[in-house]
Structure formats: C-alpha cells, structure tokens
Image (cartoon, rainbow, N blue to C red):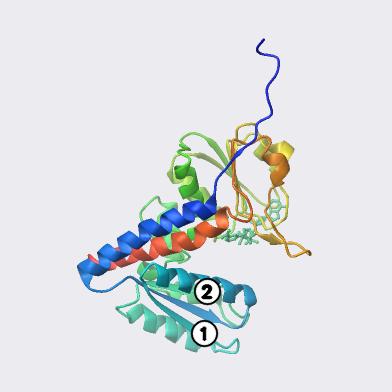
Amino acid sequence: MTGWYTAPMTAQLIDGKALAAKVRDEVKVQAAELTSKHGRPPGIAVVRVGDDPASHVYVTSKEKTARELGFGSWHHHFPATMAQAELLAIVQTLNADPLVDGILVQLPLPKHIDTNLVLATVDPSKDVDGFHALNAGLLSQGRPGLTPCTPSGCMRMLKEIDFDVTGKNCVVIGRSNIVGRPMAMLLLNASATVTICHSKSDVAAEVRRADVVVAAVGVSKLVKGEWVKPGAIVIDVGMNRGADGKLSGDVEFEAAKERAAWITPVPGGVGPMTIAMLMQNTVTAARARLTR
Ligand code: NAP
C-alpha cells in the first residue's frame, strides 16, 4: 500500500564540531606548505580591549587554535580605559608588521571607542574578520576578498552536505554586518534566490517557503518547528545563553528536526566553524601577501 502515509522525517545533523576539525586539518597542511616555501608561518594578531568575559574566552580559543595549526600568534590586551588614538596606533603598527597576515580586533570595544573607525583602520588585506567596508563591498560585488567567518562557515556546511543552492529559496533571518548581510551575499553569489528577514518582517511566512533557513537573530527559539518546510535545511547561528546557563539556538530544534532534512545543533553546529574559518582566512591572507 502506498501513497496514503508519509513517515515523519527526522533531520540529519550537520556536525559543526567534526567539520571544524576537518577544516583545521586542511588549514594546518596549507600553513605548513606556506611555512616551508616562504620560511615563516602565517601570523595572526588579536587585539582585545577591556575585560569582557566572553571576549576573553573567544580570544583564548583563537590563540590556542592558531598555535595548534602552527601559526605565529600574538595577543595584545589593553585596559578598557585605553584611548582610541592609542588603539588606532596599535592597529597601524600591526598593519606595517611583515610577520602579521591577519589582524583581529575583538568586539565589542568599549563605548568611548568608535568601532567603525577602528575596523576601517585595519589593512583590508589583513582583515581576517572580513568586517572592513572594502571587503564587504567586494563581497557585495561578487569579487574575491576576505569574507566574515561565521557566514563562510555556514556556506562550508552546505558544501559539506553537497547541497547546491542554485535557484533555491534561501531565507536569512537577521541583517547584521557580521552575519545576516554577508550570509545573504554569499548565498546570492552562489546563485540562490535570497530573502533577508529582520525585525519588521513576516518571518513565519518567509520560513514556510524556504528551502534553506539561516537564523541569525539572537532570540531563543524564535523560528518555530512548524514553520519549517518539510525537507528544508536549517542552519542555526543563534547562541542564546538561558537563565539556567544552557545555550540554545534561534530555532525550536526538537520540532524543526522532525521536518527538516538537515539541521545544525546548538551547541556543536555553526559555533565551532567560526574559528576554523578565521584560520582559513588567515592562511588565505598570508598566501596572498607572500605570493604577490
Ligand atoms: P544582531 O547584530 O543583534 O542582529 C540581529 C538581527 O536579528 C537584526 O537584523 C534584527 O533585526 C533581527 N531580529 C531581531 N529580532 C527579530 C525578530 N523578532 N524577528 C526577525 N528578526 C529579528 O546579532 P548578530 O551579531 O547578527 O548575531 C545573531 C545571533 O548569532 C546571536 O545569537 C549571536 O550570538 C549569534 N552569533 C553566533 C556566532 C557563531 O559563531 N555561532 C557568531 C556571531 C553571532 P533589525 O535589524 O530589524 O533590528
């Protein structure tokens, strides 16, 4: 008997932890090749201002990963009272340092510092976060440049499951410069049909017709499982810390996984990919500088 019953679907997980390990292995090989060919490893400098505990965790993890991959790695930490002019001078010193291929200014910066001015001061060829307006412009024109790490990680996940976004309805929820906008541009550059949602959008209506949903909002479980189109791919960028200390995503995971074909968990999904892609960007920046 066929045709009257469709078994409920349980999504396959896209394992960000395993994929990030694979990316790191690839980057390690590329870094070793560059080191043996050019006599020095790729180098990344991280600048941190103030004592934000989350920033401390991220920076420690970035440094550890960089060292494991054989990179040169420098961490410059300054008090929250640091003057903006001093920070700009540090960035300019790193711009001029021939051993530094990648500069990362950990955000958020203290309120008295103009974040846009600091990001604009980073040499675009060393902008491994991909936040400089020049790199954002190149991305929006579909030209090569350094692209933000979290959206690049999401694209790598789609590649890993061998999903071709050409002509597919891809809905990105969130329009931040760090995730939503560059994510939409990467999808558009890969010939997807892209919709960007934000706080004024009818998110439910857009998600219902999406072949791919990328949620980058910062509101726990905003995307209801019942909105997900059967067979869709759900990528959850959200990292929301509950009162119980537990992390949750922007998607109602348990319900969504009964309808999606593929879904990323939180934690263990997009999160681990970000640092791996940062390391990939650093090797890309190093290669471009060493071979020009
Ligand atoms: P953000 O700068 O606060 O941007 C959030 C976006 O979501 C905004 O565009 C906002 O719309 C939109 N939004 C807010 N409420 C909404 C609603 N009810 N319906 C629809 N859209 C809504 O955040 P972000 O930096 O992009 O980060 C988003 C999430 O990703 C956070 O949970 C963050 O922790 C996580 N994140 C994870 C990683 C990672 O490595 N996994 C990296 C970066 C960020 P408006 O523009 O209209 O205000």
Residue at image point 35% right, 76% down: 100
Is mark 2 in CB contact (under 8 Å) with mark 1? yes
Res. 33 visible in picture: yes
Amino acid type at circle 1 is His
Can you tell which quarter of the image residue 2 is in?
Answer: top right
In terms of secondary structure, where does tag 2 sit?
Answer: helix
Residue 245: x %, y % from top left: 74, 65
Residue 140 appears left or right of 247: left
Residue at image point 56% right, 54% down: 270
Query: How far apart are the two marked residues, 2 and 1, measured between alpha carbons?
Result: 10 Å
Q: How many marks?
A: 2
- The residue to which callout 2 is attached is 59
- The residue to which callout 1 is attached is 77
Can you tell which quarter of the image residue 216 is in?
Answer: bottom right
Can you tell which quarter of the image residue 124 is in?
Answer: bottom left
Residue at image point 40% right, 62% down: 281
Amino acid type at circle 2 is Val
* Mark 1 surroundings: few (<14), some (14-19) or many (≥20) residues within 10 A: some
